[in-house]
Amino acid sequence: MSPPQLSGGAQRVLDTARAEAERRRHDAIGVEHLLLALLSENAATREIFRRLNLDEATATERLELAARRSRARADGDTLSLTSNARRVIDTAGRVAREQCGEPTMEDLLRAVLAEPRGVVAKMLSEAGLPAETVETTVAEVLAGAKSPRQHTGGERVSKKAADVTAPSAPRWRYVLLAAVPVSMILGYVLHAAPLWVFITACLGVLPLASYMGEATEHLSARTGPTIGGLLNATFGNAAELIIAIVALRAGLVDLVKASITGSILGNLLLILGLSLVAAGLKRPELKFNRTTAGMSAGMMALAVVAMVFPALYHSTHPAAGRQLAELRMSEGVSVILLATYGLSLLFTLKTHRRLFGGGAHPTEGPTWSVGRAVLTLALATVGVAIESELLVHAAEAATVAVGISPVFLGLIIIPIIGNAAEHAAAVVLSRKGQIDLGLQIALGSSAQVALLIAPILVFVGVLLGVNMNLVFSPFEVMALGLATIVTAIITLDGESHWFEGVQLLAVYLMLAVGAYFL
């Protein structure tokens, strides 16, 4: 089968790749030949290599060596495309047709670097570059290229690149900010019905949590990847932590425990499921970093173990005098969890950072100054604290008015409210093709709650004189264990599709139904 005819720069790349293969007397045109041609013909490819810290000379040598493994062809043999190369060109053509155009050099470049198999994929993987990082870099470079009419050969900038690098501002939060003063007036001035105070306080937390997340991202952009990673680790679940501390002060220990479990379940099942569905609606097959998925599965297994031992002790010892022992056991387990979480940061941000890539959540518009980011973070934190006070004090009366149990409130409603902004970011990024970032948010937040937030709340309980231990109910322990198993089955192979997202959502809905009847 003869190679398909392309147009403009894309055809020039294919012609150069053919010449490279013929010069080396190879029997077929492979993806490595296409990338060698792109390095020769396309300045954007060289810029992408520079930004990814890939040495062009070393990569060229690697690609040439890989090509030499092909069987040397005899004179007169027909030079054809390998199956991988044909798939790459077909992918470029399909993308072009979706945009009502012909395949361009940029389309071909995207397809070559996104090819999941072969020497190019192996080269990127060995360099510690996940697909999301490569895709984001390609989008940034191409979005900064010339306008369509300035391109030679009729080349154009992909509209999808612009979508990734220039996300729209979350305007919904400007509307919801009105709920902040309304909730304060209802709660502190009018002493309105608890249900209305609870609803407006929940709505008020949403934009404030969004501002906290955005301010943290802008600080991360200013401080570099290592400090930025620590900032994200510190403030990633700050809104939820504040709500839990206020609930502990009010003595609502069971509500706090349910919110811990609910946050983990929401991230593992609801957000991961929505992210896979959002990403899978545009792509038949999803690929992501297996190392991240494997580490998250291990961390969640550790969290299940940390919940099992105190619960096992609680069920096998008589009630008399066991409260102090359970608290001391929880404190010891918390120290171990905190130490493990600290070492996980060292592992992901320092010693093995290359395995996880350097992709970050893209900030919207120009990066804020440090002063603006810190001020926004401080004001949003104070606002969340005030709204949390209103929310928690109205919670019990509101649940009675609506007819739901405190367990359902803690497992389902409060985690969704506290993490709504972060959840929305994961889904939006996944929908735009940045599935690795979406999974990092969902899986990373789950591990953070289990190994950082829960232990911190144990020691906050000590300071407040509240018996906050890690003895969770059998339903919560079983739910977390089952969710961890299901998530690991779906993510450990590094591949997925939209229907696996549906399966995660189904598990979450079944858990919600179970929580409703507790």
Image (cartoon, rainbow, N blue to C red):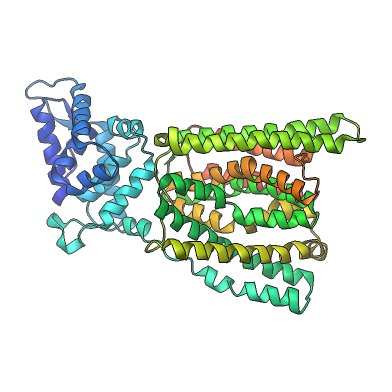
Q: Is residue 460 left or right of residue 323?
A: left
Looking at the picture, how far across and down is residue 221, in whole percent? 41, 54
Q: Position of residue 388 (x, y in %)?
A: 69, 62
Q: Dividing the picture into quarters, in which one does residue 392 lie?
A: bottom right
* Residue at x-position 65% and y-position 53%: 241
Quadrant of the drawing holding the N terminus: top left
- Report the front residue among 15 and 202: 202
Near-viewer residue (21 or 386): 386
> Which of the two residues, 405 or 304, is positioned nearer the viewer here?
304
Question: Is residue 360 visible in the rendered structure shown here?
Answer: yes
Asked where in the image residue 302 lies, by quadrant, the reply is top right
Compared with 408, 55 (above or below) is above
Q: Nearer the viewer, residue 489 or 236?
A: 236
Q: Position of residue 275 (x, y in %)?
A: 51, 49
For the point 74% across and 47% down, the residue is 257
Q: Is residue 202 left or right of residue 54?
A: right
Q: Position of residue 110 (x, y in %)?
A: 28, 46
Residue closest to the far right = 320
Q: Residue at the spot x=84%, y=37% of the render?
A: 324
**Residue 292 showing in the rendered view:** no
- Numbered marks: total: 0
